[in-house]
Amino acid sequence: MKHCFYFLLIAFQLTLLCRGVLNAQVPKSLDSLEIYVKTHPPIDTNFVRATLRLAYELFTKKAAYQRADSLLQGAETLSIKLDYGRGLSNTYTNMGSLYYLTDRPQEALALYQKSLKSAESYTLHPRIITEKTTDVALALNKLKQYDKAVETSLKVIRMEEQYNIQPRNSRTYEIIGLALKNMNKPRQAIAYFQQRLALMKQSSATPYGLAITEHNIGRCYDDLNQEKEAILHYKTALSFIHGTDYELLRSDILGNIGLALQKDKRFQEAKPYLEQSLAMAIKQGNKEAIAPGYFMMGRFYEELKDYKQAEYYMKKALAMANERGDKAIISEYTQGLADLYGGMKDFQQAYVFQLERNQRMDSTTTVRTNAEVQRMVAKYETEKKEARIKLLQQQARFNQQEAERTRFRTNALLIGAALLLLLGGAVSAWLLNRSKLRRLEEAQKLRKQIAHDLHDEVGSTLSSISMLSGHTDALLRQNQPESAQKTVQKIYTDARQILESIDEIIWTINPGNDSLHRIALRLREYAQPLMEAKGIVLHFSADSSLDDYPVSMEVRRNLYLIGKEAINNLIKYSQATQATIRFELQNDQLMVLIEDNGRGFDAAQVSQRTGQNSMKQRASAMGGTLAVQSTLGQGTRLQLIMNP
């Protein structure tokens, strides 16, 4: 289920069973735990462990969050009274897990940090310290602080190596995998999930944990649109928890199997999986899972063109999303209804929902765009101040050196020193003016470049949006909602184009991207999703030594635009199945190769749409050469050679 958070939320739960919260004196089944807690007095550590076990069973299997929270409050009080450090630390862990499951990650993070602090203050075993640190990493990942989540997970791995902790905590690899998946790097994420599977199979891993990891691998293949591979992993995950009480996880897996089958156009197979997933979520009374379940069913019936059923489920999903106040989900469900009404030819309703969705999106876009522009302006102003300070320092040093020379020459020969001082002053003034002029020219060139890019990439599109907005009002007054809907969609597309253009401009002027290696990575990030969408297998390689070669902003910009143009041509016209992008250093020269096995073209009849003249002009401006070779039916090869 794409929007159910249980894939990420429950991942941390499997190790709670392995954390030593119980011993042989405490029962294990839910019924026997209930009896134990009701009949035994709250006076010892066994009672704390039984309470923690019961709370865990209630909030992971029965979604009885309120009852579990009450039990954990009691466990906290008794642990403090008994000065029971491990019980107190585990109580805070369970509280954090409960808040995590109920979509309150900020509170979960605070409790996980409190659990870690308690474990450290009571000097618990290093294994326990690493487990508590892993919980902190999980919460950071949920809060979308992916860099901190990965950093914290790597810290855990180093601690395990330092203390030689065996077996290793495989959850760290799960968290790194989740972070990479959320950063739209599913292939890298799969490698970490597979490492976790290998570690779990070496130890006494629970079927629950194995199910979660297989499930996450399936989701990564889903992101790569490899549905058959995704379904295989989903069904493997489902087999691990067959016959258990983990209905929330089972509901998520069933929903994802249904979605994958639906994407594969196997509608009759998909329907029972989607229905079972929704029924289980309703049975549990979990609104976080019910709303996505309704939306999935709506999308399913929309594809079958059963618009009445689709409208029923999508409206129920939107109503539940409005109750929760989740802006991102509300925006998505609103767009879904707009698309549905468009398919139903009810353009008035489609326009209403599309307008509502665009208003939500525009607010977010405005804030983000303003922030990017402010950051760019602030950076530019900072660079100007630093240049002025540097110029003043240079002038001060120069004046000091001149004063010392003057005193020396005066002692030697007063008249000669006076003449030399006059000459030195004249030369100094000329050099200083020349230095100032060069810096002014560089600053002016940068300002013109930014202004030119903003005018070309943003100005014309903003003008288009302005005209289209006025045209939309006119169409509505003329009672032409279908034409108005198309105009609104064009405005949305133009707004997205502006964001992408500003992002490229900011990337180009950012001095942190002034190496050949950063350019290579940027082109790979640009090409990968486009080629995957076209079913093209990309082979990418770049010399590791490219990081040692800094380049100017102008070279960086021209090299990136040549690569981008070549990639766009490959995607649009080649009909290739294989493509190669390679950055190599050969005899102190940079060689960039972009080739494919597509249909090729007649090199003697160069089409203007390929932009070859523009690419060659950019290559020449960098002091390089660009060669394009193509043969009909045998693919195209583009090779750029330049001095880095």
Image (cartoon, grey):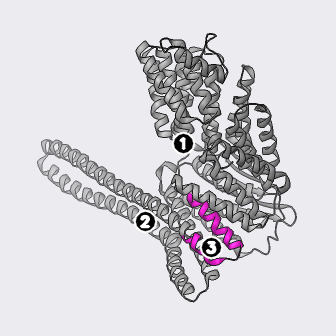
Q: Which tag, 3 or 1, sits closer to the chain's start?
A: 1
What is the distance, in whole Å, between disc 3 and disc 1 at their CAs?
A: 31 Å
User: Which labelled disc corresponds to residue 445?
Assistant: 2
Left or right, 160 with respect to 89, comes to right
Instruction: Tell me what residue is drawn at x 54 percent, y 80 percent.
Output: 468
Query: Is most of the magenta stretch helix, strand or loop?
Result: helix
Residue designated by label 1: 103
Q: Is residue 603 left or right of residue 424?
A: right
Front residue (pair 355, 597): 355
- Please report contact status of discs 3 and 2: CB closer than 8 Å, yes or no: no
Q: Amino acid at mark 1?
A: Asp
Query: Would you call the spot at circle 1 few (<14 residues within 10 Å), some (14-19), or many (20 or more)?
Result: some
**Sequence-first tag of 2 and 1:** 1
Q: Which amino acid, by three-letter code, is at mark 2? A: Lys
Q: Amino acid at mark 3?
A: Ala
Q: Please, what secondary structure does the residue beneath circle 3 have?
A: helix
Residue at 80%, 39% (x, y): give it: 235
Which residue reaches farthest front? Answer: 39
**Dot 3 corresponds to which residue?**
350
